[in-house]
Image (tube, helix red, strand yellow):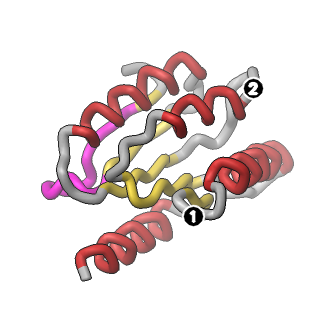
Amino acid sequence: MPGIDVHWYDQEKSIQIVTYEPDWTWEDFHVGYRLSFEAISAQDHPIVIIHDNPRTLPKGSAFSHLNASRQNMPANVILSLVVYPGTNALTTTGREILKIFIKVSDKGQPLSQVVDSFEEALRLARERLKQIAG
């Protein structure tokens, strides 16, 4: 799919990677999260989603688009990590928008987090899955 790629990181299908191309749109986002959630809903175990490389946000209200996906997120998603390095004014602004959305939408139940690198996201994903497994 142009703009966004959804795939499993591991054979167990416990970590899903959503990769954003530089020219992704909100339309791509909606198609992507539907594909993502269909694949996740087919699993009966905890899942971590890593959103990799959404370096810029498309024009339009990020809150309405992100909220639509948040409201439809499958119950077995235990953590959603967004790799969003804040290296310049534009990416720092986008990162702060995401942090505000997460704070408002998580409602005291921390589910989402913005991280600086894919490696950090992968480490946190593995830690959370290990915690859940006991």
Could you tell me which residue is drawn at 76 percent across and 51 percent down?
A: 100
Indicate left or right for 120 with 13 as reference: right
Q: Quick one: label 2, few (<14), some, or many (20+) residues within 10 Å?
A: few
Q: Are marks 2 and 1 in contact (CB under 8 Å)?
A: no
What is the crowding at mark 1: few (fewer than 14 residues within 10 Å), some, or many (at least 20)?
Answer: few
Say which amino acid is labelled 2: Ser
Please identify the residue farthest to the bottom as the structure is shown.
134
- Left or right of 96? Residue 119 is left
What is the three-letter code of the residue carrying label 1?
A: Pro
- Looking at the rendering, the stretch of residues picked out in magenta corresponds to 5-15
Q: In the image, is 32 to the left or to the right of 103?
A: left
Residue 117 lies, with reference to residue 17, above or below; the image says below
Q: Which mark is residue 110?
A: 1
The magenta stretch spans residue 113: no
In the structure shown, which secondary structural element does the residue marked by tag 2 occupy?
loop
Residue name at image x 75 percent, y 26 percent: 61
The answer to which of 18 and 64 lies nearer the viewer is 64
On-image quarter of the N terminus = top left
Q: Residue 61, which numbered label?
A: 2
Mark linked to residue 48: none
Q: Which quadrant of the view contains residue 72?
A: top left
